Image: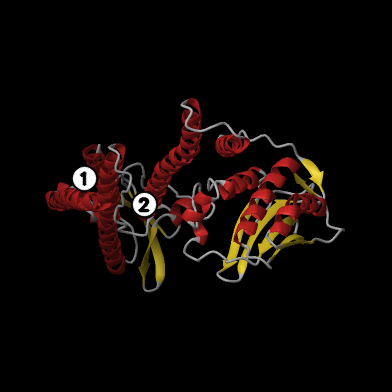
């Protein structure tokens, strides 16, 4: 394919160059021939007028001009036979071609001729009477050599264009060759491919776009592998616990007690939560997450979430407060899904906020959008981990999440639900100060949220 493209490139450049040379050559040829003919006729006419002026100075009139110029019809004077002469009154005094002695010319015909001036007075008018004759041998040789030079120039330009085309094709098509090699490697499974960006033109933009795409695909593949491993791990742990209890109960090693059944039930709840989370994410990825939009009061939504965590927050000695004006305009969202998002965010905030800390649920208007903020006074998120917190199964503290039975999907689900609402979610955090999760949604009757 690259050879074919190189061939097309070289042929195109060659044809373009030859076409340009041929057009310039034709134009130069026609211009040269026309100007040569015009110069030749000017010289003949000037010589003829000068000779006539000399005759008039000697004779003082045009009487008997035919007899004075008996050589007018000689082959050697063929060029002079092209012109006729009219006297000062516009009467023909020299018979040539269709013009006969005694014919009177019109003013328009006289304007096309050249005056014969003697002592500052126009005594006659010379006019072209017959078409110009063919070129003589010397003139024809000049034209032939001009044509030969144009042909040699065209051939030379074609050779130069061919060489330049080959050199430029290697330069221009090298990025495409590298892209083809990289794509072939990706097709074989090596997704982490980068090509050199050699220029800032369209080919350079293509190479940079490919590099970005390859990096994203490689990262997505790594995340998929990690997610698969995490799903397998998170499914295996509760299953192993329940399987161990059931085998021990079956073999009579353990006696059935309410505590042991409760432990197995808790593991089943973890499995159910993980399966529901995965289902939510798969629906969001497929664009099939069903949303029931309604007009919601931001403060009422925050009050509902606060009530859900009042008891748990009190047990952890953490205050949950609401900061939302009562006159905020309604927003358009799915109540159940937004409660799910805020519940995930508050749950994370409560997990990282120490005793005596505070969680504030804010609602504020930002231009034509509504912002919901979950702000805590917890430990904060390190700057190097902050860009990854919305990735699936990403855990800022691996051991802590696993010990508390968390799947690592909470923030990923929150992001998917918010984006399904055509909204945005972001995080702002400082280590040792706290974290703010900011959700931007459209208010009722406005366009989708913008940053």
* SS at mark 2 in the image: helix
Structural crowding at the residue carrying mark 1, measured as other residues with C-alpha within 10 Å and reported as few (<14), some (14–19) or many (≥20) = few
* SS at mark 1 in the image: loop
Residue at figure coordinates x 58%, y 50% from the top left = 411
| Residue 241 can be seen in this image | yes
The quarter of the picture where the C terminus appears is bottom right
Residue at figure coordinates x 27%, y 51% from the top left = 172
* Relative side of 300 to 136, left or right: right
Name the residue carrying label 2. Answer: 211
Residue at figure coordinates x 80%, y 60% from the top left = 324
- Residue 62, quarter of the rendered image: bottom left
The residue lying furthest to the top in this view is 250
Pinpoint residue 154: horizontal percent, then vertical percent: 19, 49
Pinpoint residue 426: horizontal percent, then vertical percent: 60, 57
- Front disc: 2 or 1: 2
Up-down relation of residue 253 to residue 209 (above or below): above
Q: Nearer the viewer, residue 57 or 411?
A: 411
The residue lying furthest to the bottom in this view is 119
In primary-sequence order, the first of circles 2 and 1 is: 1
- Residue 357, quarter of the rendered image: bottom right
* Relative side of 14 to 347, left or right: left
Name the residue carrying label 1. Answer: 134
Pinpoint residue 121: horizontal percent, then vertical percent: 41, 70
Q: Nearer the viewer, residue 396 or 417?
A: 396
Give me the C-alpha separation between circle 2 and circle 1.
69 Å
Pinpoint residue 256: horizontal percent, then vertical percent: 57, 31
Structural crowding at the residue carrying mark 2, measured as other residues with C-alpha within 10 Å and reported as few (<14), some (14–19) or many (≥20) = many
Up-down relation of residue 106 to residue 52 (above or below): above
- Residue 198, quarter of the rendered image: bottom left
Circles 2, 1 touching at the beta carbon (< 8 Å): no
Q: Nearer the viewer, residue 128 or 363?
A: 363
Q: Nearer the viewer, residue 397 or 222?
A: 397
């Amino acid at each position: 394919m690259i050879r074919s493209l190189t061939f097309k490139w070289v042929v195109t450049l060659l044809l373009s160059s030859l076409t340009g040379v041929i057009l310039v050559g034709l134009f130069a040829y026609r211009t040269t021939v026309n100007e040569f003919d015009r110069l030749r006729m000017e010289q003949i006419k000037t010589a003829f007028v000068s000779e006539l002026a000399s005759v008039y100075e000697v004779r003082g009139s045009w009487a008997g001009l035919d007899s004075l110029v008996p050589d007018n019809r000689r082959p050697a004077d063929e060029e002079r036979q092209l012109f006729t002469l009219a006297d000062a009154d516009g009467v023909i005094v020299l018979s040539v071609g269709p013009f006969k002695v005694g014919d009177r010319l019109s003013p328009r015909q006289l304007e096309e001729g050249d005056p014969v001036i003697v002592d500052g007075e126009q005594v006659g008018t010379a006019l072209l009477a017959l078409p110009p004759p063919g070129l003589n041998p010397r003139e024809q040789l000049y034209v032939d050599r001009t044509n030969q030079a144009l042909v040699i120039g065209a051939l030379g330009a074609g050779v130069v264009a061919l060489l330049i085309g080959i050199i430029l094709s290697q330069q221009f098509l090298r990025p495409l060759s590298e892209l083809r090699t990289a794509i072939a490697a990706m097709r074989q499974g090596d997704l982490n491919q980068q090509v050199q960006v050699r220029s800032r033109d369209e080919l350079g933009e293509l190479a940079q776009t490919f590099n970005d795409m390859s990096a994203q695909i490689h990262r997505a593949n790594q995340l998929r592998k990690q997610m698969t491993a995490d799903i397998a791990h998170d499914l295996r742990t509760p299953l192993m616990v329940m399987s161990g209890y059931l085998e021990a109960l079956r073999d009579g090693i353990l006696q059935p007690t309410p505590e042991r059944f409760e432990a197995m039930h808790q593991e089943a709840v973890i499995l159910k939560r993980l399966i529901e989370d995965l289902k939510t994410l798969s629906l969001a990825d497929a664009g099939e997450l069903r949303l029931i939009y309604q007009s919601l009061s931001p403060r009422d939504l925050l009050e509902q979430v606060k009530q859900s965590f009042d008891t748990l927050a009190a047990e952890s000695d953490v205050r949950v407060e609401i900061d939302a004006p009562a006159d905020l305009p309604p927003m358009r969202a799915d109540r159940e899904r937004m409660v799910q998002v805020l519940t995930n965010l508050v749950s994370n905030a409560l997990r990282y906020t120490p005793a005596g800390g505070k969680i504030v649920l804010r609602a504020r208007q930002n231009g034509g959008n509504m912002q919901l903020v979950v702000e805590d006074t917890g430990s904060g998120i390190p700057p190097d981990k902050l860009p990854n917190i919305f990735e699936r199964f990403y855990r800022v503290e691996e051991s802590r999440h696993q010990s508390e039975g968390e799947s690592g999907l909470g923030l990923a689900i929150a992001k998917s639900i918010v984006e399904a609402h055509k909204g945005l979610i972001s995080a702002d955090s400082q280590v040792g100060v706290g974290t703010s999760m900011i959700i931007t949604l459209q208010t009722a009757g406005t366009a989708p949220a913008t940053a």
